[in-house]
Amino acid sequence: MSIELYNPFDSTLESLEYTQEKDKGIDLPSGAGPGYSAPIKDADGNVVGAKALAWTQEGKKLLSIYIARGAPGRDHRADVIEFARQLRSLLLS
């Protein structure tokens, strides 16, 4: 598991939108966004985890959360979304 905060985040909202499209990311639910979650795949295309990126409205701060090769049977996407929801108010305010 990896959690990183970029403050300031030195990119643009357009680059985040491009990254979301490339990752085939799904918007975070209300209260956890703006941001998205996406699967993490291994070299063979198997899903081995999930990631979430969350940012401030103006894109000045970015929070990234990665869970790879986590516990079997866990819903890693649900886990990263919950981490993003919980950490948003602490790290991105």
Image (spheres, rainbow, N blue to C red):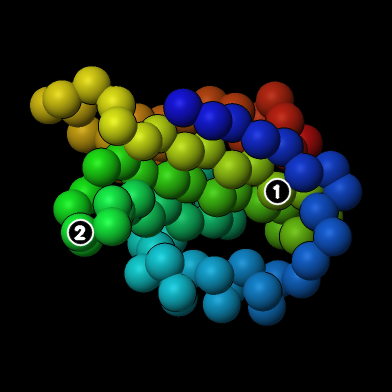
* Sequence-first disc among 2 and 1: 2
- For the image shown, how many numbered marks are present on the structure? 2
Q: State whether residue 63 appears in this view.
A: yes
* Residue that appears at 67% across and 74% down: 15
| Drawn side of residue 5 relative to residue 77, left or right | right
Residue 2: image location, x then y, percent? 54, 30
Which is nearer the eye, 20 or 58?
20
| Drawn side of residue 22 relative to residue 12, left or right | left
Residue 88: image location, x then y, percent? 62, 35
* Residue that appears at 76% across and 71% down: 12
Residue lying at the far left in this picture: please name it: 73
Residue 82: image location, x then y, percent? 41, 31
Residue 63: image location, x then y, percent? 65, 42
For label 1, the crowd category at 10 Å Cα-Cα, with few meaning under 14, some 14 to 19 and many 20 or more, is many
Q: CA distance from mark 2 to mark 1?
A: 29 Å
Q: Secondary structure at mark 1?
A: strand
| Drawn side of residue 75 relative to residue 7, left or right | left
On the image, numbered disc 2 is attached to which residue? 44
Three-letter code, disc 1: Leu
Q: Quadrant of residue 21?
A: bottom left
Which is nearer the eye, 46 or 22?
46
Q: Secondary structure at mark 2?
A: loop
* Residue that appears at 66% across and 35% down: 4
On the image, numbered disc 1 is attached to which residue? 62
Between disc 2 and disc 1, the foreground one is 2
Residue lying at the far front in this picture: please name it: 43
Q: Are marks 2 and 1 in contact (CB under 8 Å)?
A: no
Residue lying at the far top in this picture: please name it: 71
Q: Quadrant of residue 87?
A: top right
